[in-house]
Amino acid sequence: MFGKILIRKKIFNILYASIRSHQVTVLGGATDVGQTISLMLRSQPNITKLVIHDTLKETPGVTLDLSHVPTNAEVKGYVGEEYLEPALMNSELIICAAGVTRTPSITENSCFTTNTVFIKSLAKAIARLEPMPFIGIVTEPINSLIPMTAEIVRNYGELDVRKLFGISTIDFLRAQILYASIHKLHPSDVSVPVIGGRSYKTCIPLLSQALPAKDMNEREAQTFTMKLRKADHDIMKAKNGLAPVLSVAHSAVLFTRSVLNALDGNDEVVHAFVDNNDFGTDYFSGLVHINRDGVKEMQRYSKLSNFECQLLENSIEELRKDVLQGKKILEYA
């Protein structure tokens, strides 16, 4: 029996050795979302060092807790803003889940103000990194924080805009689940593109491009869009005011896997909010093709429905406002 265990362990180590190793940093690693992301990344075979950073006093305990999950990856924790730069050093991918989440008890303005303080510190630290790593931001509001990050990094250092992403995977996953439920399909067999931005007024599901194709009239499309846009609200209501955690963390992990696969030399796709001026907004979300250098191009769609065109028209002006709000922070950075 002991001999069989040793053989299995040797095979396990050989498999690990054949996979390229990566270092990933999770910022906000002691938050609910950050802890969940960190736990799931702990078991990724191609992550050999997982770095956790937060300003919360629980951070050392979270790091210790993670270290009790037996994998080959090293876990390192940092607590405090003064240790932000050491937490970023040598990481190829930085996942940002820090800050506060919009809930009934936290106003939109308070959320933006609090998270802006963190993003300003992060962006200045990123500007000092050479080369710039991949950056995936979960922290809201993504529509403003991504352009804000870009402007600050550009001002203080060398920006590689191809490597800056607002993670919008959660919108795609929710559309996938909703479409599958309506049409009694298995979610893994479904694809519903979601474009625009990562907010209630800018999120646009493209049912005309959904696979497998199903006829849905405008009223059904309106209902679908409303349900997708209200998903955060519905979860918070069901959780008595608490924000979504598990699905958001899962979406960040899917993004991480794709980026690491791209870093290994493979062409990949992610759902993200990135630098894109196809609609005159400077930034846009959708299905993005990436490689080891970052963004290659965003998937484009033709023959949208009249309803989708109207949604797009309404969303563009809102998205421009969000992006401008982020860019203006440079005046105070």
Image (cartoon, helix red, strand yellow):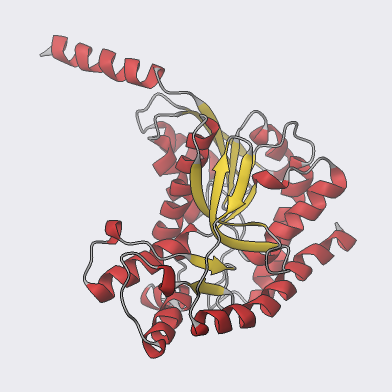
The reply to whether residue 61 is visible in this rendering is no
**Residue 184, image x and y in percent?**
21, 71
Decide: is 123 above or below 47: below
Decide: is 315 above or below 166: below
Residue lying at 37% horizontally and 35% vertically, measured from the top left: 43
Q: Is residue 195 left or right of residue 278?
A: left
Decide: is 69 above or below 55: above
**Residue 140, image x and y in percent?**
61, 64
Q: Is residue 288 left or right of residue 319?
A: left
Q: Is residue 55 left or right of residue 246?
A: right
Residue lying at 46% horizontally and 61% vertically, measured from the top left: 170
**Residue 14, image x and y in percent?**
33, 15
Decide: is 321 above or below 44: below
Q: Is residue 174 left or right of residue 188?
A: right
Front-most of residues 292 and 34: 292
Q: Residue furthest left?
A: 1
The N terminus sits in image quarter: top left
Q: Residue furthest front?
A: 303
Q: Residue furthest bottom?
A: 219
The reply to whether residue 97 is visible in this rendering is yes
How many numbered discs, if any?
0
Q: Residue furthest top?
A: 3
Residue lying at 34% horizontally and 82% vertically, measured from the top left: 216
The C terminus sits in image quarter: bottom right
Residue lying at 39% horizontally and 66% vertically, measured from the top left: 174
**Residue 79, image x and y in percent?**
63, 41
